[in-house]
């Protein structure tokens, strides 16, 4: 199997049915972006020395999918936080959202830094 990149990490959480925790593990990714190996680094298939490797110092885990996102609202954090729900929506959030431009709303949509590289938006702003 062809490997495009090998990731080495002290801890890998493969998200398998048995909730495994792998120590000193390797994850190989093929040219199509699919994982070709996930397991102990000592048992990983050999790859040439010149092959790209990424040595991680933390936990390697799959990215999460946020299935109920209102990402543009991250820009409105703290706005009317002391109001009851309906007042907060009607008097603070909805008027502020109405003034947002598409580029404003998209600024709140980066989930990579939170571990959620994919999302399903509640309301996608017009582009």
Image (cartoon, helix red, strand yellow):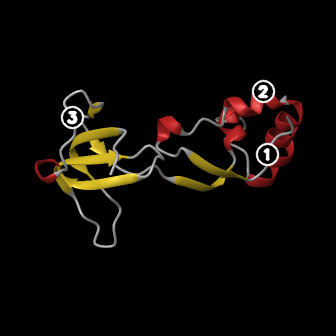
* Front one among 122 and 57: 57
* Front one among 79 and 118: 118
Q: How crowded is the residue under tag 2: few (<14 C-alpha within 10 Å), some, or many (20+)?
A: few
Local secondary structure at mark 3: loop
Residue at screen point 29% across, 32% down:
54
Q: Earlier in the sequence, mark 1 or mark 2?
A: 2
Local secondary structure at mark 1: loop
- Say how many tags the image has: 3
In front: label 1 or label 3:
3
Local secondary structure at mark 2: helix
Q: Measured from the top left, where is residue 127 in percent x and y?
A: 85, 34
Residue at numbered disc 2 = 103
Left or right? Give the position of 115 relative to 56. right
Residue at numbered disc 3 = 48
Residue at numbered disc 1 = 124
Give the alpha-carbon distance from disc 1 to disc 3, as whole Å.
45 Å
* Front one among 90 and 36: 36
Give the alpha-carbon distance from disc 3 to disc 2, as whole Å.
44 Å
36 lies above or below 7: below
Q: Residue furthest bottom?
A: 17
Residue at screen point 79% across, 41% down:
93
53 lies above or below 118: above
Q: Measured from the top left, where is residue 4 in percent x and y?
A: 37, 39
| Residue 47 in which image quadrant | top left
């Amino acid at each position: 199997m062809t490997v495009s990149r090998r990731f080495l990490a002290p801890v890998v959480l493969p998200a398998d049915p048995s909730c495994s925790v792998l120590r000193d593990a390797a994850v190989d990714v093929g040219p199509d972006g699919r994982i070709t190996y996930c397991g102990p680094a000592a048992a990983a298939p050999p790859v040439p020395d010149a092959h790209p490797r990424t040595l991680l110092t933390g936990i390697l885990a799959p990215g999460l999918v946020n299935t109920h996102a209102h990402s543009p609202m991250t820009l409105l954090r703290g706005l009317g936080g002391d109001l009851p729900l309906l007042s907060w929506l009607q008097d603070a959030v909805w008027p502020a959202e109405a003034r947002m431009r598409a580029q404003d709303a998209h600024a709140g949509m980066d989930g990579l830094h939170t571990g959620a590289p994919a999302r399903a938006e509640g309301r996608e702003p017009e582009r």
